[in-house]
Image (cartoon, rainbow, N blue to C red):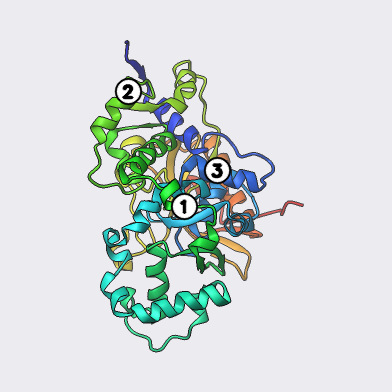
Amino acid sequence: MTILNISLQAARNIHLAAQGLLYKPRLSVDHQAINDTISRMSLLQIDTINIVARSPYLVLFSRLGCYPPELLNQALAKGDLIEYWAHEACFLPRQDFKLIRHRMLNPDNMGWKYRPEWMQQHAADIEQLLKHIEQYGPVRSADFSAQSKGASGWWSWKPQKKHLEGLFTAGKLMVIERRNFQRVYDLTERVMPEWDDALHGLEQQQAERLMLDNSARSLGIFRPEWLADYYRLKNIPLKSWIMTELDSDRLRQIEVDSLGTMLVHHSAYTLLEKARNNKLKATHSTVLSPFDPVVWDRRRAEALFNFSYRLECYTPAEKRKYGYFVLPLLHKGQLVGRIDAKMHRKQGELEIINLYSEEGIKVTAGLLTGLQAALTEFAQWQSASSVRLSGAPATFREVWGLGWEITQRE
């Protein structure tokens, strides 16, 4: 079989299409759109930093535009989504409970997320907590008072917080909703009454093969070494899985300019054909979260988009190159820059503390228009009435000035 050759930009476009980031979002968003978007990505990583918008809401905004954030909360509360450790802490489609159940049943393999010695030492209290939930219903960590405050970290949590997190990792409890973004826990048997481990459970290898397929589908196009990171898989028979998928035409090898041999998932074959015929065009400009699947694997982002990126919020201020919470900027199929931003909610103002364009990116009128529209929509979504530009290259300031006012949509 002849191996196809496509351009680097075509490969980027296939990946962005698989992720739902190639075209401008639809005009209206409902519950199904939330579920479909998360299913398309397979995972929606959770992070609590709230300098602009919390990451899971922002990842959805990048794909859906100005949607009501409460739709995500409702999807979890309705049971359309579950929460567990996947890439990291993530929302997943309910039907993917079967993929991560084996992790719950072997919590000792979950590293820092589960402390068996703690669970053993406090077995009586933990059993009492489970009986309390069984009798009185769901609980939050906030329902229990802290006994003392210590240094930050897992071991400074109040005992009930540690109990709840251990029970969550061990699959005895699940998150049924988030109140003020705090987890609300209930018994797994009440959350998943239809589930039976003996009937529905998968062996670890079965589950991991399905995870690999999800990863390949959500990436669209990839190098083999990019797959395992998606669900943080370890010691998997990747080569044999790839050979099996190639033999069954569920994967195809192609050549990509400057990147060499890559693989395309069968769900992206139509995209591949469009890319070959130069009919797969990127039109979307938006702001990405640092925890967006497009950039959470830093090596993949650098190889595919020539975008060197790291999150610096955990780096001392004096050692930061770009800023505390820096957001990549996507424009028509390329990562063209990044912003260090902050949402001033009381003032209704989105501040662009600094904007940086990528080396080699030509700042055209189209790029300026596209990014200004993207930043305006980003601000509107957060109910801001203005954007303030505190720092940016001269080419941006000449057109944007010190910022702009926003006319809110009806």
**Residue that mark 2 sits on:** 246
The image quadrant that residue 257 belongs to is top left
Task: Say above or below: 156 vs 110.
Answer: below
The type of residue carrying mark 2 is Leu
Spot occupied by residue 138 in the image (x, y as percentages of width and height) = 55, 71
Residue 126 in the figure: left or right of residue 50: left
Viewer-nearest of labels 1 and 3? 1
Which mark is first along the chain, 2 or 1?
Answer: 1
Q: Name the secondary structure under disc 1.
A: loop
**Residue that mark 3 sits on:** 37
Q: Is residue 153 visible?
A: no
Outermost residue, bottom direction?
A: 147
The local crowd at label 3, few if under 14, some if 14 to 19, many if 20 or more residues have their Cα within 10 Å, is some
Residue 195 in the figure: left or right of residue 258: right
**Residue that mark 1 sits on:** 196
Q: Quadrant for the N terminus, please.
A: top left
Give the camera-side residue of 256 and 254: 254
Viewer-nearest of labels 3 and 2? 2
The type of residue carrying mark 3 is Thr
The local crowd at label 2, few if under 14, some if 14 to 19, many if 20 or more residues have their Cα within 10 Å, is some
The image quadrant that residue 47 belongs to is bottom left
Give the CA separation, mark 3 to mark 2.
27 Å
- Disc 1, disc 2: CB below 8 Å? no
Task: Say above or below: 332 vs 273.
Answer: below
Spot occupied by residue 265 in the image (x, y as percentages of width and height) = 40, 28
Viewer-nearest of labels 1 and 2? 1
Outermost residue, front direction?
A: 198
